[in-house]
Amino acid sequence: MIFSFLWNSWIENHPYSSTEYSFQIEDRKFILGIDKNPDHFGIDEIVSESKDSLITIGMHEKVGDSLKLTSMQEKMYFYNNKLIGFSINPTQIELNKIE
């Protein structure tokens, strides 16, 4: 009973949120999902309309004005709707927020 109360209280004060961004490199389409509580991210490649493929997943942390995205394979930065350091294209990539 006490655990349930504490858990519900924590959930109310730390709401879950998720934001998705799309981007394209040559003819390949990707989705970057950034979640809060827990603070993690994932990048999926859209293979077809009904199928996607997970490219990388990891944790994120706030560093100054940007988010540092860290996975087992790489480190990237998300800043001002741009992704920097993605291994497929390490230059700055413009992201489009999915509403």
Image (cartoon, grey):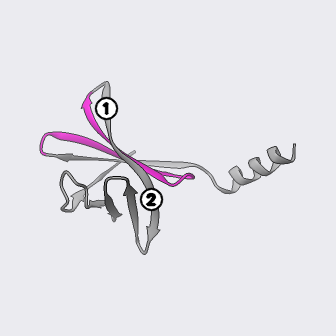
Quadrant of the frame with the C terminus: top left
Q: Residue at x 69, y 50 (%)?
A: 11
The number of numbered badges drawn on the structure is 2
- Pick the front one: 61 or 23: 61
Is residue 33 shown to the viewer in this render? no
Q: Amino acid at mark 2?
A: His
What is the residue that sits farthest to the front in this orientation? Answer: 72
In the image, the segment drawn in magenta is 26-48
Q: Residues within 10 Å of mark 2 (few under 14, many from 20)?
A: many
Q: Quarter of the image holding residue 59?
A: bottom left
Left or right of 54, for residue 93: left
Q: Residue at x 37, y 53 (%)?
A: 72
Q: Which mark is residue 82?
A: none
Q: Amino acid at mark 1?
A: Asp
Q: Which residue is mark 2?
A: 60
Q: Which mark is residue 52?
A: 1
Q: Residue at x 24, y 57 (%)?
A: 94
